[in-house]
Image (cartoon, rainbow, N blue to C red):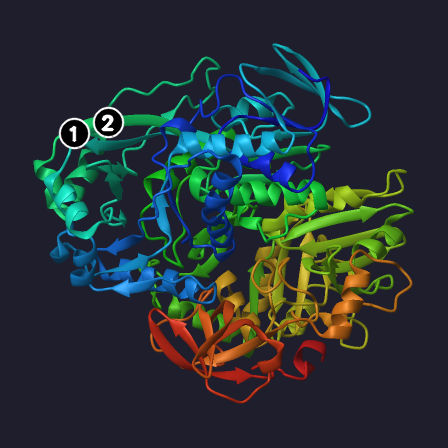
Amino acid sequence: MKSHARVAVIGGGVVGCSVLYHLTKFGWTDVVLLERSELTSGSTWHAAGGMHTINGDPNVAKLQKYTVELYKEIEAYSGQDVGLHMTSGMMLAATRDRFDWMKSILAKGRYMGLDAHLLSPKEAHELMPLLDPTQFVGAVFDPVEGHLDPYGTTHAYAKSAKKNGAEIYLHTKVEDLVQREDGSWRVITDKGEIVAEHVVNAAGLWAREVGRMVGLELPVLAMEHMYLITEDMPEVIDFNRTTGKELMHCVDFDGEIYLRQERNGMLMGTYEKACRPWSPLTTPWDFGHELLAEDIERITPELEVGFRHFPAFNTAGIRKIINGPFTFSPDGNPLVGPVRGMTNFWSACAVMAGFSQGGGVGLALANWMIEGDPGFDVFAMDVARYGSFATLGYTNAKVRENYSRRFSIRYPNEELPAARPLMTTPVYDRMKAAGAVFGASYGLEQPLWFAPEGVTDAFSWRRSTDFDAVGAEARAVREAVGLMETSGFAKYGIRGPGAEAFLDRLLAGRMPDTGRMALAPMLKEDGKLIGDFTLAKLGEGDFLLIGSGIAEDYHMRWFERHLPRDGSVTLTALGLSLVGLSIAGPKARAVLAELTHHDVGDAAFPFLEIRAMDLGMAPAIVGRVSYTGDLGYEIWIKPEYQRYLLDLILEKGAAHGIRLFGLRALNALRLEKSFGSWSREYRPLYGPEEAGLGRFVALRKPADFIGKAAAIAEKAKGGALRLRSFILEARDADVIGDEPIYFNGAVRGWVTSGGYAHAAGLSVAMGYVPKEIADAEGDWSIELLGDILPARLQRQPLFDANGSRMRG
């Protein structure tokens, strides 16, 4: 075994071998893989081996498409047969709600070039004669689906990597990881030691144990997963004989089963409600090529539906039942990327769908390590999407929920209950008593809307029971004044003699003067948006940065990567040590004036001003800014003052018609202003010119901020896309994101977000289209739940187009 390597990959499953191969493919050949047993010894060897390109997140779908297309390449390069069977596949819907969901998935595929289409039950039966067409209302056909041999595929990755110069050490157990002063890692094994510049945790079932070696508790849990394989079935043999084809893959969402052909029989697997974690606290190191005890009674409810939907199974014998553990994250997506706070320690685990996603994970991680960027927008898979709230108990509860709902509909207005409430603010009980319906974001409970007595959230793809209440909240802001909690925003304190210079390089915008705020885009080296913030200068060397709550760890990782090493800057994620309230609307100033002796008139307290002031008896920081686009103020206080201040504002605001409002009304209000939001309109796919943030990028400031050269180039060339708003002739539903935008009958763009703008009384969509047509007159339309609806380009914000209310 060699003593030094550039990268040590821990784990010889399909993901570890993919990472190893992609590193060598891109030129890093001094790499090793360490496997405690044989390749495929964890979850890989007993996987069903299915693969598909369709995914609810289009960015993940792109990586799945890459993975599927990669198999012929590694088969040819390695000489190893991967057992590829491209059978095509279909997703089946037994209910109208499920069929609506499938239409939305199909629509996402249109602008990605996926060649999928809808089927009637009769058409589905013709392609897959084992199903009973009377049990279904429709289906989606996907030509790019199939299955392969897990063993052969993993070895094809491994042989390709070895051909490129990688070394693989089997029966070599990693026992500890110790970081040296120079940042490199001592990888201590039972066969000796390797010093590696980078370590990749691709340990699968043992990912938690490898993480714990460096003091990291990864949010990953293994679940027992069962599938059965039938004996030979005459229906399968007859189909093969008469068509010359294999039976296609099927996912029966309402039955919570999947199936494919296996030799002359069928394989049927379940994601059962009565799910069971496996080894929830620790994974035994001596577990290997073993299966778990059969427990067919536990999956009987799903099998009963499956046998009803596919009657041929009723007369088929069961040849084998496979029960093995697979790892999951709380939301079912992989945990990929550099781990915050560690030097060159990388995660590539919780890749449950390894044969759909393993290639894409390897590609993204290799790009990230070599180029400093994954090359894709992989936030949905980024390990940084979870913070310290994702404890062992949280992970156990959310993984159970995710597994048991894997084939269930997640409605756009549905909030899942597991592991809640976990994090709450001091006003949680006050909000709940006022009728708040909460959502959990980054572990924190936040009011979404306030339900009148007797009204509850009814989950739907269409406008639901919250519609009238959210409308009333939005109109209250526009007509009088509204109060909402903003504690879920991410808050960062940046202090020190080097703080201003650090921020001037980190952020692309102009630095504000003392007592002022500025909108501050943050770019990557390639000029794409990695964040958008409000920056406030509270004093010399004292700054407050406000951003998206879901991206706190993601942004902290970036901040810490660029912090000066001389100790001149301290940067702290303030979390719930600083909580917030916001008032907005034409009467907001009148309410604020009743809370303080300070002059809050427009001349004394203009737009984007920020200052410390007492509100009643509570010390606060008040900034004149509001994401509603209206006259408004954000108020930041320590948590011990929040209950008092909430009560005081409601008391003083009563005479002005104050009303509590939540995040759904805020979304409606920001749409009227064409304000984008992080992870929807603003993400690493887009440059500032494309996103409409070019005016906030200070290309002429002396500081050589990150991404400046790329931003200058984008400004000169104009970028490829433009963010635009549209008014949609919707009927009883509104867009939520990823719907295709048509121009003159052809798909030319995609929706990033939208909803009903209650105060304006219009359905709004925001999305990206090519710059060449961004302002063109023509036949615009947007696909929504299977219907292509007329849309109108909205060139000016629906509300306060000249900003007079916001600034006045």
Alpha-carbon neighbours of circle 2 within 10 Å: few (<14), some, or many (≥20)? Answer: many
Cβ atoms under marks 2 and 1 closer than 8 Å? yes
Above or below residue 30? Residue 620 is below
Position of residue 456 relative to residue 463, above or below, is above
Q: Residue at x 26, y 44 (%)?
A: 256
User: The residue tagged with tag 2: helix, strand or loop?
Assistant: strand
What label does residue 318 carry, if any?
Answer: 1
In-front residue for pair 473/365: 365
Could you tell me the amino acid type at mark 2? Ile
Q: On the rendered structure, is 586 left or right of 758?
A: right
Q: Quadrant of the C terminus?
A: bottom right
According to the picture, the residue beneath numbered tag 2 turns out to be: 321
In the figure, is residue 437 to the left or right of 553? left
Image side of residue 239 versus residue 199, left or right: left
Q: Position of residue 218 (x, y in %)?
A: 55, 31
Direction bottom: furthest residue: 777
Q: Residue at x 62, y 75 (%)?
A: 587
Which quarter of the rendered picture does the N terminus lie within? top right
Which amino acid, by three-letter code, is at mark 1?
A: Ile
- Give me the residue at 59% from left, 75% from top: 770
Toward the left, the furthest residue is 315
Is 742 on the left-hand or right-hand side of 527?
left
Rendered image quadrant of residue 311: top left
Question: What kind of element bears circle 1?
Answer: strand
Q: List x then y, in percent, for residue 606.
A: 78, 73
In this rendered view, identify the residue nearer to me: 412 or 648: 412
